[in-house]
Image: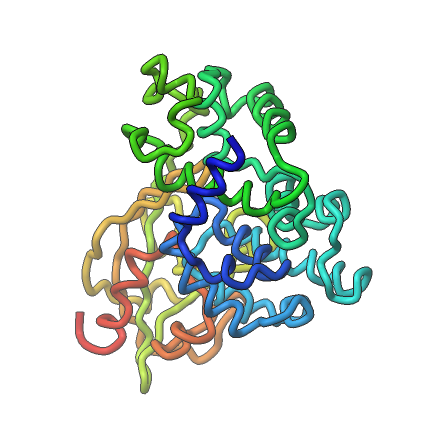
Amino acid sequence: MTQQLLDWYSAHYRPLPWRNDPSPYHVWVSEIMLQQTRIEAVLPYYRRFIETLPTVADLAQAPSEVLLKLWEGLGYYSRVRNMQKAAQVVVEEYAGALPADYDALLALPGIGPYTAGAIASIAYDIPVPAVDGNVMRVLARLTADDTDVLSNEGKKCFTALAWDLVPEQGAGRFNQALMELGETVCLPNGEPHCTDCPLQNICEAHRLGCAQRLPVRIKKTARRVENRRIAVVRVEGDPPAVLLHKRESSGLLADLWELPNTLSDNPLDSLPTEWRERCTKMADLPSGKHLFSHIEWRMQGTLYDLDRAESLPEGYALATLEMLQTAFPLPSAFRTYANLLPQILSEEC
């Protein structure tokens, strides 16, 4: 199996930047970005991140606003916060070099078994597996195993199998080959490309004709729905600006700037009391929706004009269009309205 897989990988792998230069830092950044994000979406973020913060030490000391701006649009901001915490530990305890040890990697903030396995095997060729969703899908089909891959039992089962399969030499290429097979051939949510698979002759699910039914994934409970009213407040000036609010330092989207919003029916309830009567409604804006892991936001926006804002309460800021592009990271949850801001701030809406 191993040689068949590696031969296929040599002929079909995609020359991604972190594969072309698989330093421990590059592998780490790419793997954290790729969690719950497609490769095509990650590429420009990865390049910009590495260009701005080329070393672990640069990441460790990066200002929060710079860090969050680099991550803007990727979501799950706790990932990058934990990366910085881990980078600070690496600088303090390992002289700025990620440790070449699976258990030491696993002890760093935000690094779980998969990421530790990816860094250890790809960057240091340590014979440990890197088991993500793609790998579990491939293994479930190879063995025709209907254990729920989302369950603790399933994760333990397929991780144990991966430990048995990973070779003593070339572990990084083997792990990447399994991932690549899952991403490009042994596809989810549709018919796998079995005729293109180098492991077709040893795949039990292909032999039994049940590949499309595997892996088994028992869905979690439904997301909680929140109906949010978004206040897009345009403030006069030269140039005009939009009002932003900074979220609390813990919880969902912690420490990020947002468009003022509320669960009440009146979007003005999200504004400081002294400004509410001074806002003039200009237009209803499109509805929007954003899915978090456990919450669904259903949003309705309203555009208001505010004549001026001499003093800002703590936690509020005014951002011009240029500042939105360079300084204030807006979460992707507000993308529907962020995409309208260039028009809103440059002409009458």
Which quarter of the figure is the C terminus placed in?
bottom left
Q: Position of residue 64 (x, y in %)?
A: 59, 67
Residue sitting nearer the eye, 34 or 278: 34
Q: Residue at x 76, y 59 (%)?
A: 89
Q: Position of residue 165 (x, y in %)?
A: 60, 30
Most foreground residue, 57 or 82: 57
**Left or right of 165: which side holds 307?**
left
> Does 340 sit left or right of 165 as displayed?
left
Residue at horizontal 33%, vertical 75%? 235
Q: Position of residue 56 (x, y in %)?
A: 66, 66
Residue 188 vertical placement versus 348 (above, below): above
Is residue 146 shown above or below 115?
above
Q: Specify the quadrant of the image occupied by residue 26.
A: bottom right
Residue drawn at the location 57% of the way across and 52% of the way down: 79
Q: Position of residue 166 (x, y in %)?
A: 61, 35
Residue 259: quarter of image: bottom left
Compared with 319, 246 (above or below) is above
Residue 340 in view of the camera: yes
